[in-house]
Image (cartoon, helix red, strand yellow):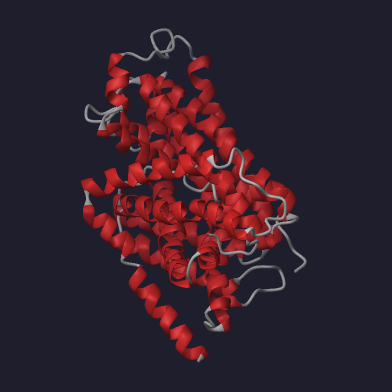
Amino acid sequence: MSQKYSLTVARNVVIANMIGTGVFTSLGFQVLEDGIPDVATILLAWTIGGILSLAGATSYAEVAGAYPEDGGEYHFLTKLYHPVLGIASGLVSIITGFSAAIASLALAASSYLTIDNELHQKAIAILFIVFIAFIQWFGVKIGGIVQNIFTALKVLMILIIISLPFLFFEESLLSTLTISFSDTSLALIQSPSFAQALVWVMFAYSGWNAATYVVGHLDRPSKNLSPALLQATLLVTIIYVLLNFAFLASASFEDLAGKVDIGNVVVEKYFGAQGATIFGIILAISLLAGINSMFIAGPRVTQRMALDLNFPTFFSKEHNNGAPRGALVLQLIISIIIVVFSSFKDIVEYIGLSLTLFSMMVVAGVFVVRAKKVHTNGIKAIAYPLTPLLYLIMGVWMTYYFASQDPMKLVWATITIVPAYLIFRVKVKSKA
């Protein structure tokens, strides 16, 4: 296999996967009265999200070092535990982790173009998806170049937003903003609202594991995988904390409460409605970085599953330019179907829990890898066993809270075991 993704592309895939709609929507719910309306508590939640993501990333790196093939959770869980779990996570990744996430990003991008008609929004979202799939059709090299360009645009746009309250000091709230832990802060940290806030935060941080989906196509993975995951996750953590600080330093809780387009609220304050419109166009374009990165990573899951489960070669075949075109077409179709039949809210609510459950299983796999003494190509989790334990403890806490609030979400997140088992039985029967 001649064409490989460089460290830069892998790092940008992670950054683009992480920085999506979550960071521009979460704060609007956190500042509500039943949220965590306290500056210090909000910034703490975003800091904790970054620490947990780093803990997960370093744990994933070791597991990927032990099983360095494409496929992400599908491949890891198949090797660590049982193919049924691997197939279940693969189905969730294909439908939810990538296709639904692509749909949500495309819908968000179209909404930032200030198009009020829902039908027109969905049409624009579909055009965005088709455009990015068309780019990925031309393979690893072209897809990687476009990823670097889109990611640079996205990071530049965010750095500009972070600088706004400092550039427009008099119009901002910097002179009155107070960051200190009070009795109110401590009470909020111990409340169910903080757990709910962390669920939204972790949704915003999701994507820190993106490079593991293409580890089989990564140049020198033993050298480049850990830096790609950790450098990108650390950078995004810094960006998220600073970005939320900039939001809080630009608009009051009342202005931010319940808003799903925080970026527009902030930009409109400094530049007016016309400036917000221009910003919306730039943000919509920058969100294409996330769609592109998911079209890089997602089809590799389908391709890996097709190879392992003897699916039609259409889904496993790879073009000379490195593009898994059959898998690419499948992800394109599923993404468009989700855009047509689902709302943005439905998509976001379904993504979080199912991905958290499978990621916890992979992180726990670090203990399995060490118990079995599997060779990891020199990749080790930093601060083991603290990092995987920290991720697992917080994951259990958030899952318990999430399930207690809406048990049906847990049911739907685990029910994928049924089709996974049926697929596994068919595979076993066909081999017999």
Which quadrant of the figure has residue 338?
bottom left
Report whether 420 appears left or right of 346: right
Q: Is residue 136 left or right of residue 431?
A: right
* Quarter residue 197 falls in: top left
Is residue 112 in sight in this rendering?
no
Question: Residue 296 at x, y = what percent?
Answer: 59, 59
Q: Which of 226 and 6 is in front in this view?
A: 226
- Residue 114 in view here: yes
Q: Which residue is drawn at 30% across and 34% down?
A: 29
Q: Residue at x 52, y 82 (%)?
A: 311
Residue 275: x percent and y percent?
A: 45, 29
In the image, residue 277 above or below residue 267: below
Tell me the quarter of the image containing the N terminus. Answer: bottom right
Q: In this view, does 333 lie above or below 193?
A: below
Check the image and report above or below for 298 versus 304.
above
**Which residue does the image show at 48% across and 90% down from the upper left?**
430
| Side of 373 relative to 258 (left or right) | right
Residue at image position (37%, 56%) is 354
350 to 247, vertically: above or below:
below
Pick whichever, 353 or 361, lies toward us: 361
Q: Residue farthest to the bottom?
A: 432
